[in-house]
């Protein structure tokens, strides 16, 4: 069960690492980013427990929306954002736009790995299979969205930087909130858009990756 829980993260980490084809990041710093994501679970759980006002987030749209966008989306993405800003933003290895995506994905998947271990150990192998195709990739793609805007913010003019910093904060929260709202609502007419939404996240994320990879100053 433990191997089933961590396997999706390993595969995704490897994928986004290999996409950095012009100048890959030092593995030591990547492991640090991943570990920071892992330990971010502690403050996230503490804050979420304080904010979680409803026992059943699927009772109605208000409770589903609050739990999806505030308890899950805002809290989890805010701590990932803070971790990136504190430990990566000023680092000398953050020297090209795509690095923003790489480090945000590693932080996001650190959190997602610990979260996934908890769910899988409690609920079994079937949960591991479902989450390998849904929740774990979703966290990686929220990280792609955050890293895309923060990567641009790092190297754009100071006048435009605040705009992209805000986008790097709010866009992942919205993407995360919509993902959870679809699931928490337990409405069939919303659940039928879940697969199209996952496909949208993948399409958007891969487009962001392709765009920033080609901006590398190390490209020959």
Image (tube, grey):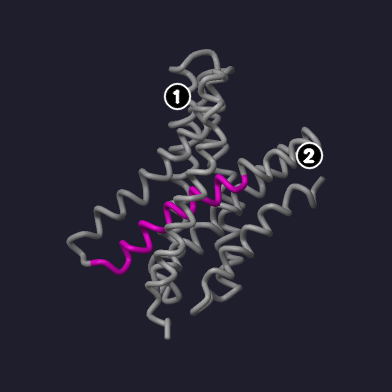
The secondary structure type at the circle numbered 1 is: helix
Name the mark on residue 99.
Answer: none
Q: Residue furthest top?
A: 59
Where residue 181 sits: x, y (%)?
49, 28
The image quarter in which residue 121 lies: top right
- Does the magenta-highlighted stretch encompass residue 219? no
- In this image, 167 relative to 40: left or right? left
**In screen coordinates, is 98 left or right of 44?**
left
Residue under numbered circle 2: 121
Q: Compared to 207, does 93 lie above or below?
A: below
Looking at the rendering, the stretch of residues picked out in magenta corresponds to 136-156
Q: How many C-alpha atoms fall within 10 Å of the one at disc 2: few (<14), some, or many (≥20)? A: some
- Which numbered disc, 1 or 2, marks the residue that appears first in the sequence? 1
Give the x, y percent position of residue 156: 26, 66
Q: Residue at x 55, y 47 (%)?
A: 139
Does 166 appear above or below 62? below
Residue 142 within the magenta-colored segment of the rendering? yes
Front one among 212 and 51: 212
Q: Quadrant of the N terminus?
A: top right
Name the quadrant of the C terminus. bottom left
Residue at position x 48%, y 50% in the image: 203
Q: CA distance from mark 1 to mark 2?
A: 28 Å
Residue 111 lies left or right of residue 216; in this view the side is right
Q: Which mark is drawn over residue 65?
A: 1
| Image: 219 above or below 113 | below
Residue located at (55% from left, 62% from top) = 33
Image location (x, y in percent) of residue 84: 45, 58
């Amino acid at each position: 069960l433990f191997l089933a829980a961590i396997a999706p993260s390993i595969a995704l980490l490897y994928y986004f690492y290999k996409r950095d084809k012009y100048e890959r990041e030092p593995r030591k710093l990547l492991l640090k980013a991943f570990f920071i994501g892992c330990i971010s679970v502690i403050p996230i759980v503490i804050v979420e427990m304080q904010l979680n006002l409803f026992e059943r987030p699927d009772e109605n749209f208000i409770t589903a929306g609050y739990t999806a966008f505030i308890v899950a989306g805002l809290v989890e993405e805010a701590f990932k954002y803070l971790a990136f800003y504190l430990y990566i933003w000023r680092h000398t290895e953050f020297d090209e736009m795509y690095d923003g995506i790489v480090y945000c994905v590693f932080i996001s998947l650190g959190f997602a790995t610990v979260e996934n271990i908890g769910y899988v150990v409690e609920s079994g192998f079937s949960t591991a299979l479902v989450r390998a195709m849904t929740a774990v990739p979703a966290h990686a793609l929220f990280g792609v969205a955050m890293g895309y805007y923060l990567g641009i913010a790092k190297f754009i003019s100071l006048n435009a930087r605040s705009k992209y910093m805000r986008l790097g904060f709010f866009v992942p929260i919205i993407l995360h909130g919509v993902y959870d709202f679809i699931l928490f609502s337990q409405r069939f007419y919303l659940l039928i858009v879940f697969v199209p939404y996952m496909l949208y996240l993948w399409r958007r994320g891969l487009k962001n990756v392709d765009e920033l990879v080609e901006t590398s100053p190390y490209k020959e």
